[in-house]
Amino acid sequence: MPSGLRGARIAVVGAGLIGVGWAALFLHHGADVALWDPDGAARETARTRMAKPLADLRDLDDSLDDSTCRPGALVVCDDLGTAVSDAVLIQENAPESIPLKHDLFREIEAHARPSALLASSTSAFTWTDLAPALKDPRRLVTAHPFNPPHLVPLVEIYGPDDTRVSHAETLYRAAGRVPVRLRKDAPGHIANRLASALWREAVHIVADGIADVEAVDAALVNGPGFRWSVLGVHMGYHLGGGSGGLSAYLDHLGPSQQRRWSSLGHPSLTPEVCKALIEGVAQEAAGRDILALEAARDTALIAALKARKGTPVV
Amino acid sequence: MPSGLRGARIAVVGAGLIGVGWAALFLHHGADVALWDPDGAARETARTRMAKPLADLRDLDDSLDDSTCRPGALVVCDDLGTAVSDAVLIQENAPESIPLKHDLFREIEAHARPSALLASSTSAFTWTDLAPALKDPRRLVTAHPFNPPHLVPLVEIYGPDDTRVSHAETLYRAAGRVPVRLRKDAPGHIANRLASALWREAVHIVADGIADVEAVDAALVNGPGFRWSVLGVHMGYHLGGGSGGLSAYLDHLGPSQQRRWSSLGHPSLTPEVCKALIEGVAQEAAGRDILALEAARDTALIAALKARKGTPVV
């Protein structure tokens, strides 16, 4: 498994949190990675910042004694053209600015092999937003990971060319990811639309005084979030319908769900609401800083991933 | 831990899926359980239907050699008054009908000890809906579990009397649950409000042709759902703000989240949408019937719970 990309050369454009996570993931799965960032300091520290994700991935893998499972080679490039010229996949992770990404993709297209797949990790934009930069926009896919990208399996893919989307799926699967295909370009893809919808209600619950920030998070992590780590939301309602499945659920409880939908909140992020959220999260953090919280998150994600290896999700 | 309720007598009213799950959980943690259901067939099969949840709970516990950790005793009662008369906690799990629950609570109050805590597992109703049945409504709490109740840790509690809510929290903690307190009575409590908000967008994504049912479920289970099993949604945005935390996130991305909120869907469960959901879930189930899917869910939840024991969530 970890040698699924052995011999492939992958370019990672942008050495921020997401770029470094992708680079570690590709390296761990055997690819040779060419990493570029316009910022010299980001290039210099990239290797150091990659140590933790690489160690996490080694921790997840019990087959490392196998000499075929060594990581690929990392080259940090001073120049974008060099980084992308030999790559089969070019993964762009620039800040969320359309002009910036357009400039980058123009330069990437000028230097990439004709067969190379161009992929954007963009969270804020769609394929339609980015495509105008390219002479051949069908080479582009959006391939959005979920943070931290080396631990959360999802990659959401959209592109208009089925052959290229299938190629992308093959590459990401070889990097141990679970690719999910969109049929239509959409802002927020799938996962951030779901997350945004859930967060809106989570903010409403706090703003309306139903429960504290910490209580909302505890309810999610010990309730629906816990169940959604193994069972999808549609499938959950299928099981909620008893022996009649989703069809029986929709017959009996569809109308009450529609009523519930119309009763959900429409909060605004006013200064008062923001203050309640910030204070609530500070209370929940209980003195732990961002680094400590990230470390706790990653340790828990790694334990959850190990549990999945033994017992696949539904 | 599994003997946290040793010596306590708990009444479980209603022997459906939720009642049987509660009964197994209380028994496993050492309580003596008196179970009642108006339906003779439900009473007769309750013990058999309890075998699987009891086995799941034993599987989760590695301390069973300890003779102090034996389960409590189960009595199946033919009569509601007998079932509740000696109980410290009476957990009601009747079908979701107000007149039915009002009748039950009137009879429960007539036979229960004055100090007994009356708890409803209601999903559809609020404390305010149920309280009028009681002479002393402050004895009542809503204590809503998430299915399957013996595996999903959450219990959401609301009641107007802080002392009784604290007492309820103590009892549910002794049963290995994670109690979460609402500050205000609300339809759907916390978890089903969050689930309903997320499902609305999940239905929209299918209805709008953005992605298939199976793709939406795969994105959730491998993306945000996976992360929400260890990290709350508010805390997730706190980590999304980099070193500035939630405050920086709200400054930089609050406005774009508000725009995203206004772009989320408002689907209707029309016959066409229901058909797409039902067909999509059938495809995702890939021939597995409800029992097989439930078994896969429970195996995966047990593996996830074991992972949490070694590594607590954030």
Image (spheres, coloured by chain):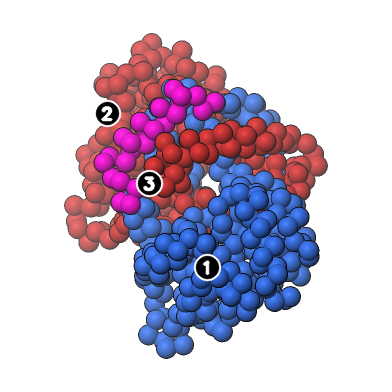
Chain colours: A red, B blue
**Front label number (1 vs 3):** 1
Instruction: Give B268 or A248, whichever is nearer the viewer.
Output: A248
Q: Which residue is found at the position 50% from the left and 39% from the top? A: A252
In-front residue for pair B105/A76: B105
Label 1 crowd (10 A; few <14 / some 14-19 / many >=20):
many
> Residue lying farthest right?
A272
Q: Left or right: where does residue B262 sit relative to residue A270?
A: left
Residue B36: mark in rendering: 1
**Residue B290 in magenta?**
yes
Q: Is residue B297 left or right of residue B270?
A: left
Task: Answer whether residue B285 is magenta in the image.
Answer: yes
Residues rendered magenta in the picture: B268-292
Relative to A220, say whether B55 is above or below. below
Pointer 3 and pointer 2 on the same chain: yes
Q: Which residue is mark 2?
A: A167
Q: Is residue A298 above or below residue B199?
A: below
Residue at 36 percent of width and 67 percent of height? B48
Residue beneath disc 3: A243
